């Protein structure tokens, strides 16, 4: 069984890299149309990788004792969520170019999960509220990660247009207005999910500010405030461009420290 899972891992990694590589090739040519690499082919390769990734995840996560959400397993699960959301949303929205960075990261996370086992088992008797908190936290982080990468692409697009160099891969990106609209759509969805995550955490956990949780909670609340202020500024003052990019990245860094940073320190550095 282990050899079978390892084989599936390598196939999934190859498909992730192939999909990301073809996206990069298309972007470097500045070709947003179907051309030599039809969008459906690129997305289909990625989705097959996601399905295989899910098989490996199930093998690693589901144990007799409960759900194993060790550090590398959690990272892999998060990148699986991100890849799934990205690829499915790309069939309707022009955000597939984000996959150039995120699909290789999903491949790396899958390799780490498979070859660097980590243990942090949640018992089978976890409360429903805690389950909702974990699920919405992962979904919120996934959506807001897409928003952060979208903001980086938007910053590059702004820079090229400001320097009057709209050629190359800029031609493969949607218009600036569309890119900004997609950014705020992602932030809006992410903020709703993060709100549910925080509320379910306060309800289901005895003390979210207990030892080993305080840093995670504080940074998560800071991130929520940053994204909420950004959406308010967009609605009230029409914030866009560099202001939107800056606030998005600040919020994402806070979220990164909340979820990945705290888990890395506790499980890998401190061994708790």
Image (tube, rainbow, N blue to C red):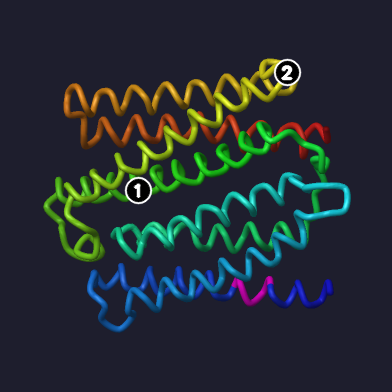
Which residue is label 2 attached to?
Answer: 206
89 to 16, vertically: above or below: above
106 to 45, vertically: above or below: above
- Please tell me which residue is depicted at 63% across the width and 70% down the height of the picture: 52
- What secondary structure is found at the residue carrying circle 1? helix
Question: On the rendered structure, is 56 left or right of 143?
Answer: right
Task: Tell which of 208 and 17 is nearer to you.
Answer: 208
- Please tell me which residue is depicted at 42% across the width and 33% down the height of the picture: 191
Q: Are marks 2 and 1 in contact (CB under 8 Å)?
A: no
- Please tell me which residue is depicted at 75% across the width and 17% down the height of the picture: 211
Magenta region, main secondary structure: helix
Residue farthest toward the bottom in the current orientation of the protein: 36
Q: Which mark is residue 150?
A: 1
Question: On the rendered structure, is 163 left or right of 44?
Answer: left
Quadrant of the frame with the C terminus:
top right
Question: On the rendered structure, is 125 left or right of 186?
Answer: right
253 to 236, vertically: above or below: below
Task: Tell which of 87 and 110 is nearer to you.
Answer: 87
- What secondary structure is found at the residue carrying circle 2? loop
């Amino acid at each position: 069984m282990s050899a079978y899972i390892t084989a599936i891992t390598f196939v999934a990694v190859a498909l992730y890299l192939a999909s990301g590589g073809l996206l990069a090739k298309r972007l470097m040519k500045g070709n947003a149309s179907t051309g030599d690499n039809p969008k459906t082919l690129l997305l289909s390769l990625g989705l097959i990788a996601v399905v295989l990734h899910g098989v490996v995840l199930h093998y690693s996560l589901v144990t007799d004792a409960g759900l194993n959400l060790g550090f590398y397993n959690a990272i892999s699960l998060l990148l699986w969520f991100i890849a799934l959301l990205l690829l499915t949303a790309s069939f309707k929205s022009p955000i597939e170019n984000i996959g150039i960075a995120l699909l290789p990261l999903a491949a790396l996370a899958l390799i780490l999960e498979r070859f660097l086992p980590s243990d942090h088992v949640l018992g089978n008797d976890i409360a429903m509220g805690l389950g909702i908190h974990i699920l919405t936290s992962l979904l919120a982080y996934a959506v807001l990660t897409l928003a952060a990468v979208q903001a980086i692409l938007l910053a590059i697009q702004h820079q090229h247009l400001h320097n009057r160099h709209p050629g190359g891969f800029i031609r493969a990106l949607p218009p600036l207005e569309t890119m900004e609209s997609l950014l705020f759509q992602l932030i809006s969805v992410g903020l709703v999910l993060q709100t549910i995550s925080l509320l379910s955490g306060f309800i289901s956990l005895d003390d979210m500010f207990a030892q080993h949780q305080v840093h995670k909670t504080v940074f998560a609340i800071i991130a929520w405030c940053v994204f909420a202020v950004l959406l308010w500024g967009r609605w009230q003052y029409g914030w866009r461009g560099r202001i939107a990019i800056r606030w998005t990245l600040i919020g994402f860094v806070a979220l990164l420290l909340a979820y990945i940073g705290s888990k890395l320190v506790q499980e890998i550095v401190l061994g708790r």
